[in-house]
Amino acid sequence: MINPPRFRPWGQLDWVVPRIPNCNWSFIGNVSPEDRCLAAWHVLSSLAPSSTGEFMQVIDPPSRYSSAIEKKCHALALRLYTMGLRHSDIKPVPLLARSEELVKTVNAFIASASTDVICDISTFPKRFFFPAIKLLLSSDSIHNLVVTYTLPDSYSAQQLSEDPDPWRHLPLFAPPYPEPEVKLLILGVGFEPLALPELLQEDYRGVGIKLLFPFPPGPPSFQRAWEFVRTIEDSFPHAAREPIRVDARDVSDAFDHICAATDRGAEYAVLAPYGPKTISLAMCLYSIVTGHPAYYTQPKVYSPDYSTGVSDTYAYCVKLQGHNLYSL
Amino acid sequence: MNEQRINPFNELYIAETIPPEQFISLFSPYLVQDIQDGLALFQPGNVVLKGVQGTGKSMLLNLLKPEFRLAYKKARADLPIPRKLSRFIGAGINLARSVAIDFGQRVIEKEHFDDMESFPIYFGDFLNYWVVEDLLNSVIKLSSECDGAVGAELGINKNKRVLDQFARSLASHQCWFGYLNAVRTFADLKTRIVSRISTYRKFLNYNIHSLPRELRSSKTPIGEPISQTVEALWYAKVVPRDVSFFIRIDQYEELGKLKHSPGARDSEGGLGLRYREIVNKALSTRDPRISYRIGTRRYGWQDLRIFGTSSNLELERDYKVVDIDAILRRQENRRTWSFPDFAQDVFERRARHSGYSNSSNSFGLFLGKGLDSKEKAEKYSKPKSDEPTEEKLVLPRKWQKLYSTLRRQQPLEAKLLEAWVLQNSVEKLAEREPKPPFPWSRKWWRKERIQHALMHIASQRRQRMIWAGKEEVLALSGGNILVFVSICQSIWAAWARATRGRIVKEAAQGIVPSVEPFIQAVGIYEASTQQYFKIEQKTGESKKRQRFIDFLGRLFRNRMILDRSLSYPGHNGFSLELEDLSLDRSIAGFLNDAVDYGDLFDSPHTTKTKDKRPRRKWYLNPIFSPHFQLPVTHVKEPMYVTVRDVKKWLEAADTIGAEPEGETSPKSKSERAQLPLFGKHSN
């Protein structure tokens, strides 16, 4: 039986928040060198001044960009202090922190949070927001969970990230055991393939690949997304021929596309969340509900000019009044 | 007319998707059958198989997997191993994919947050159970698939009563510390083992609150359950005693990258080192019942301490090494170089698989002899309108005529003459008569400088250097079969483009074509650039390595171009004193990584200095030579540098906009950042 489509509210943050009344929001975000890292908190604190906020600051391993990143993060942290946050509200965590540390940090937030949580994934690395969403969603103490994402004005034309780690599951998203035969890999199309083509050739020969192509990306993202596809095409011509176009703002639609590709979870799939965070969020939510693993080649260096400026902030209702809207 | 132009090299990797019989026809057993070194893998005793990516390490280890053996059986082909060595059963663990390396990510025992002692024990226990489960799966798979033909060959008895008896016998052994006490049947045994692995995985994935007490109180010592499983299989006569057991441990080098070191000082090396010690402990037992096979990159195998002791593993006593790089890379003596035959075998199998009728002599035909140095020099010197930008030397009158003739007709001779004069002075030349034998014709002096001279001629005439022919393709491949296949792929693609829209005799006849050198040169250049861009697609500090390689490539070229007297033809590499290097672990680690990923090649350097201090030398992977327009050959002395110099290079390479000394025409920053309009190879 085909389940009826489910309404999963989403829209601009200042449209969504007033429509979830009687909430006392606890916010968690990430201080990064990107201007957009403060946008959601800025909107929320004007809409709901009683909200409380907490930020992590993900510390990358030392690189040639370290001082530039530190300088930018410091400037943005100062802005947060002027917005009422205290030093203790910003918690530094190493990029490659152990799962234990990530879980402890998120659980500490949950313990002090209200029943209504907003998690801003705009600048969180995937290895942070995947486990965070899983823990937040599984917490009985959280009744309403909204995930926000802010688009930047523009992305740097230079390389955004470098030095990928080997292909590993994201923390808390390991495959089950015994693992079913992998027949399908669902891959989000992004800007940086990050060692992916070689890994795919070595480890996923004979596996069906579905590409989730953010559409319409608009120039210059358009060219970079197709360049990503081209690198995959070298190894998997069939996958590149039929990418699934997904509205990069519509998490619900992306989730439904993944469900359709896997016969609502019946076909075991491996998820590779490259590409926009929103599509990654859909993969994360799908992975949580099915237990299918999510893999990534975590970069160790990010550009200090990753993005500039702030555009729209979108909010996605994930859990409302205790109900997970992203179930099968 | 039906034309045959299918590129036999389109698939760089032999796909698992193609039917087994085709897989077998493409797979080259050369390393095992013809070189013999690979045979050590099928003989008792522990073996460490070293090699960079793409050398065929995984291919060799695959021969131990039951799936591979069954594929041969399905294809009705003989295993490419001598019959007397084929009585084995393989099982193993991939340390990364099994998530064994996740131990340490979550605290197991609350009181031990920074527990360097118990994490390795759990890692070892997980490894034991995983391997035992895989071993049981191998036994069942080999005896069940292909109508049990392989099982029958090996003499496997899969009778339920016998298997149940085996399970009870194994479960009663004390090495399990009671965890298997309730096991009565083979099915129970499998369920119990799977349950333990599954519980570990759930725990590490935070799907259960804590690790059950029964697991925490029944941790097994590394290797012991595997040995006991083999003993029980023999004892219960499930498997005859003449069948050997080989245990693969894949991705061993990943342990070296485990940086999380709770509570550890740097000198202790973190958990990764402890996990290596655990694996080393398994090898150190030299248990005759099982033989371990460890696949690793060259520098992945360097911490040899045995867990819980102060002893180290000993080469030849505890393990043997099969170094594929050493086997396939060219040494001083060409006659001992086995890669050409391996490459030829791979080439001909690919050609045959794609339906070309002349596959047996296709390799030499496809690439031919290429161009000799004289031909290359003449090619670079055309068109004549592009005269050298450098000034002519002013030579004694009696030499002027010959010099002018040589410049017009034999540019290579003219370049060598110039170099000799710049090294020795015009006066020295004046002492000689302008007739043979010329001083620059001395065998070794000339041989060592020809490639350097050709580089100069091409540069002065603004021509791209040419690589073509079988010998040069083999040299550029650097003993790496994957690189060889990608070069052939690009040459074939260049040929297909060059002959588009034309009726080509070979295509019409369905035979492998003979590709002319100038088309080969285009394909080789494309393959080289492609390999250069692939550096950043690898893992680890890939971008940093790519920047370093880029820096080195331009540094070497600049220095060699500025060296008009051709005094330093070996400056396409550098040499460091080992003692100097040992003082800087970060530089040593970076260079080792670059070697492991195949970006740099290294070898011991027999120094010419008086102090005779031990040194090591490094060169770029030869496939990068066309991209950087550098000679491939390693002649005379490399640059003698210090670790401080290398550190400065690394810093400069890592600094945005920095250029190597003497950079003559740097591409602008924007030019480098620009995406190519028409594919990645456009330049």
Image (tube, coloured by chain):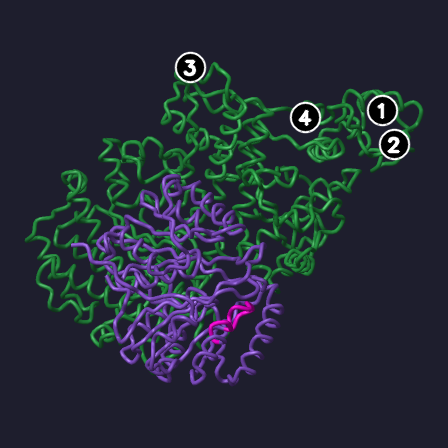
Chain colours: A purple, B green
Q: Which mark is residue B376?
A: 4
Q: Position of residue B480 (x, y in %)?
A: 49, 40
Question: Which residue is label 2 attached to?
Answer: B393
Q: Are marks 3 and 2 on the same chain?
A: yes
In the displayed structure, does residue B376 sit left or right of residue B195? right
Going from N to C along the chain, the mark reached first, 2 or 4, is 4
Q: Chain of mark 2?
A: B
Q: Amino acid at mark 3?
A: Gln
Who is closer to the viewer here, B499 or A96?
B499
Report if residue B467 is visible in the image.
yes
Which residues, given as a range, are shown in magenta?
A31-41
Q: Secondary structure at mark 4?
A: helix
Q: Which mark is residue B403?
A: 1
Q: Chain of mark 3?
A: B
Q: Amino acid at mark 2?
A: Leu
Mark 3: few/some/many CA within 10 Å (<14, 14-19, 20+) = some
Q: Chain of mark 1?
A: B
In the displayed structure, does residue A121 sit left or right of residue B158? right
- The rendered magenta stretch, by its main secondary structure, is classed as helix
Closer mark to the observer between disc 3 and disc 2: 3
Image quadrant where one finds the C terminus of chain A: bottom left
Who is closer to the viewer here, B471 or B191?
B191
Residue B445 occupies which quadrant of the picture? top right
Q: Give yes or no for residue A236 being in the magenta stretch.
A: no
Q: Position of residue B186 (x, y in %)?
A: 12, 57
